Image (tube, rainbow, N blue to C red):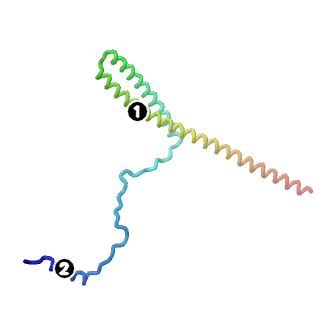
């Protein structure tokens, strides 16, 4: 019977004699990019923020009115004992309330950012007002001491 292993071993020996083996260098791990790259949100100007606050407050009022109307409609349907319609309206009311909550959270975040900005502006104005005044008083006191020194 023919042994297949012998020709293979002879071929490997011949290859080892003529071929120069080199180790791979560097990392063998593959780079896998993240599925959702995290992008930083750009800075928002004061005008954009105030526009967004007004839009969110209008949307919040609208959603509040819609949910009040849905609750009235649910009460009417419940009196008529139409429970399937009542269950459907409850689902719609739940969707409205979750959406209202998201808008409310967004509005509160924007209002907090606006308040922080106003505090920053007030602090900046206070420091800018005090620094020229303090340098002006320092220069006037230096001039007065110089004038008294020259008199003596």
Q: Which mark is residue 77?
A: none
Location of residue 124 with respect to 87 vertically, above or below: below
User: Is label 2 in a helix, a strand or a loop?
Assistant: helix
Q: Position of residue 13 (x, y in %)?
A: 22, 82
User: Is label 1 in a helix, a strand or a loop?
Assistant: helix
Residue that numbered label 2 is attached to: 9
Marks 1 & 2, CB-CB < 8 Å contact: no
How would you rate the neighbour count of disc 2 (Cα within 10 Å): few for under 14, some for 14-19, many for 20 or more? Answer: few
Report the front residue among 143 and 35.
35
Residue at 25% in and 81% down: 16
Q: Position of residue 39 (x, y in %)?
A: 43, 50
Residue at 61% in and 42% down: 121
The answer to which of marks 1 and 2 sits earlier in the sequence is 2
Quadrant position of residue 119: top right
Residue that numbered label 1 is attached to: 98
Q: Nearer the viewer, mark 1 or mark 2?
A: 2
Residue at 46% in and 27% down: 61
Quadrant occupied by the N terminus: bottom left
Report the front residue among 16 and 62.
16
Q: Position of residue 2 (x, y in %)?
A: 9, 78
Which residue lies most toward the top here? Answer: 80
Residue at 43% in and 24% down: 65
Report the front residue among 99 and 55.
99
Quadrant occupied by the C terminus: bottom right
């Amino acid at each position: 019977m023919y042994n297949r292993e012998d020709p293979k071993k002879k071929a490997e020996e011949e290859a080892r004699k003529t071929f120069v083996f080199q180790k791979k260098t560097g990392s063998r791990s593959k780079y896998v990019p993240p599925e959702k790259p995290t992008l930083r949100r750009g800075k928002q100007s004061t005008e954009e923020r105030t526009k967004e606050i007004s839009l969110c407050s209008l949307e919040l009022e609208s959603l509040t009115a819609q949910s009040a109307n849905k609750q009235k409609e649910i009460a009417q349907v419940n009196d008529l004992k139409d429970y399937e319609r009542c269950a459907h309206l409850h689902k719609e009311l739940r969707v409205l309330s979750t959406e209202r909550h998201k808008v409310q959270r967004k509005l509160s975040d924007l209002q907090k950012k606006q308040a922080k900005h106003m505090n920053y502006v007030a602090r900046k104005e206070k420091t800018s007002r005090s620094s020229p005044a303090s340098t002006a008083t320092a220069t006037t006191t230096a001039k007065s001491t110089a004038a008294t020194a020259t008199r003596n």
